[in-house]
Image (spheres, coloured by chain):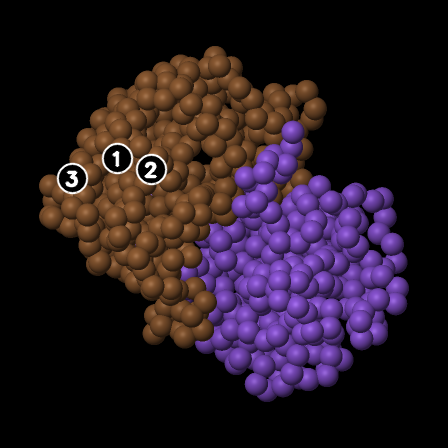
Chain colours: A purple, B brown
Amino acid sequence: PLRRSNALNSQKEAPPVNIGWDSHKPIETIPDSLVRPGDGPEGNTPMRAKFEKMCREAQIMITDAISEIDGDATFQEDCWTRATGGGGMSRVLSNGKVFEKAGVNLSVVYGSMPQEALQAATERGVDRAKGMKPGERVPFFACGLSSVMHPRNPHAPTMHFNYRYFETDGGVWWFGGGTDITPSYINEEDMAHFHGTYKKVCDNHDPEFYPKFKAWADRYFVISHRNETRGLGGIFFDDLNDREPDTIFEFSKEALNSVVSAYGPIVEKHKNDPYTEQEKEWQQIRRGRYVEFNLVYDRGTVFGLKTGGRIESILMSLPLTSRWEYDHNPEEGTREWEFLQACKYAREWI
Amino acid sequence: PLRRSNALNSQKEAPPVNIGWDSHKPIETIPDSLVRPGDGPEGNTPMRAKFEKMCREAQIMITDAISEIDGDATFQEDCWTRATGGGGMSRVLSNGKVFEKAGVNLSVVYGSMPQEALQAATERGVDRAKGMKPGERVPFFACGLSSVMHPRNPHAPTMHFNYRYFETDGGVWWFGGGTDITPSYINEEDMAHFHGTYKKVCDNHDPEFYPKFKAWADRYFVISHRNETRGLGGIFFDDLNDREPDTIFEFSKEALNSVVSAYGPIVEKHKNDPYTEQEKEWQQIRRGRYVEFNLVYDRGTVFGLKTGGRIESILMSLPLTSRWEYDHNPEEGTREWEFLQACKYAREWI
């Protein structure tokens, strides 16, 4: 018998949505849209479809740009549908010349969750279950594009982004997302470029966005058990629904479409930097930290694992290789130590 | 300011016990006992001290035996005390000839937890908070010895054990523990030896123990999101308090003291086996799975991370290196595929 049928196990580990680990069916090509025609309790299908379209265009645009930077690799494309509706498409580059691993996932999810799980998946304690009876599962729709890119060179940073749109039945909706960068060493010029790009994007929409979302990223990407961040931040936001949906859509779109201009030049600049074995080892140790954050704290990963998402797409974010040395403490004053200081005390980069 | 002082973060990520990430003080040598003299609400100090003594003797005995198998490495010893009482000692071997990483941790914890966290830390829904008011934190005592050993050779399995004794105020007590093995390839003779050793240990105490605890290990060491076990099992038990404490103590003691005879001969046999690059890579992929289980599901790891345990000791269990390849599926009929089948459908080895 399959393990999931084990009574004790399924009782303790059952995913909070009504979809199991084997509920993804590979398909040859992705349909024009994974959004059900005409659905959405408030007739908000236009935003569902509009957000999906934006994600799909960005997925192609970004992976094309990364292919070009790599020079030598193509993205493997996998499409699937979900048993309860929706589906997705992963585009993953493995063993490239510049990138060890880089992937961009599109995901459209129709599911339902216990009300508590829905609260835990976001930050503010707002009522996402409007009109639902206590104990009743909340049907939801989610569409998002997420990505992690791990270059080989220890002087070329890892980058992650995720932009998503959520709705629960009852018409509660919100946007979330962000782009953040995880180098192994500090390069102030690179950080000024990356953060500067996103400050400009933010400022085009609201002068309060950058300081607020920069601080949010510094709080969010924390490996709590180590009291350090996984990288050097960027922007992060969640539960954004304090203005018109179209207004937030335009902000999300510009942020997503700025990934290549924020990150591309940094990888181009460093992809052929010389490096030592010791620098490669430090990168591997930082990749171990990346794994710790993603498996223990990352909202998207935990949400995906618990909602029966496609495992290979969710864990595509993990690096090709990583390293854990017992009680590794860089000597004070070294560049490794300086980097750790920046992970312990948030800095401004522009 | 330190990140932990951030209001939003501390509200969401605060560990459930009143002890923080910086509450471990290194000490030169460990005192004769970390158990407070005369404590325990029911005057059960004898078991606290007795269990600690057993753990400490086993820690020395096991690390000495592993040193000898390695031939080339010594264990680094780190001792600490905890701000709220108790402390511990780690003995860790890094970069040995046979072992990439092997560690044995002694831990004595005085803490307090929300009642729900205490329930989550164990399996049965019994009342561990007898006499406590709703919402009141439950003071507890815990003492345990835990270990993970990762050999270099892909034909020599990883081994893990953990034996522990818990008490909450109000005099509720229980024992937990187990020893389990995680090869990268199936070797039926090895599995018969390992499981056979623990069957004998179990049978010396109760003929129902082995079938019950073997099945428990098969359920417990499951990577739910992949629907596979991390390895090939062993024994696991928790909440054991259905007979006299001394009776369970004797069982725990024999199980702990059988680690070397169960595992040692298997490593001796395979430590110099020839292997291919492909076999080493498969081992690295399985080590990635080990990381997934430990960071997402392992009760001891999650308990340690959330209760402000000593991070380096808790995460000593992670392998030196690991690997995640996108959508890696061994071909049907290969030894890698056979191993995965054994992780999907539990087998009997004796």
Q: Is residue A279 left or right of residue A42?
A: left
The correct choice, above or below, for B247 with respect to A215 in the image is above
Q: Chain of mark 2?
A: B
Alpha-carbon distance for marks 3 and 2? 17 Å
Labelled pair 1, 2 in contact (Cβ < 8 Å) = yes
Question: Which secondary structure, mark 2?
Answer: loop
Point out residue B38 in the picture as x, y percentages from the top left corner.
11, 48
Q: Is residue A204 visible?
A: no
Q: Chain of mark 1?
A: B
Q: Nearer the viewer, mark 1 or mark 3?
A: 1
What's the amino acid at mark 1?
Answer: Pro
Point out residue A55 in the picture as x, y percentages from the top left corner.
75, 64
Q: Chain of mark 3?
A: B
Quarter the N terminus of chain A occupies: top right
Q: Is residue B279 left or right of residue B75?
A: right
* Residue at (63, 36) in percent of width and height: A5
Alpha-carbon distance for marks 1 and 2? 7 Å
Picture quadrant of residue B341: top right
Disc 3 target residue: B46
* Residue at (55, 70) in percent of width and height: A123
Q: Which mark is residue B245?
A: 1
Q: Which mark is residue A223?
A: none
* For marks 1 and 3 on the same chain, the one whose residue lies earlier in the sequence: 3
What's the amino acid at mark 2?
Answer: Asn
* Residue at (64, 72) in percent of width and height: A128
Disc 2 target residue: B241
* For marks 3 and 2 on the same chain, the one whose residue lies earlier in the sequence: 3
Q: Nearer the viewer, mark 3 or mark 2?
A: 2
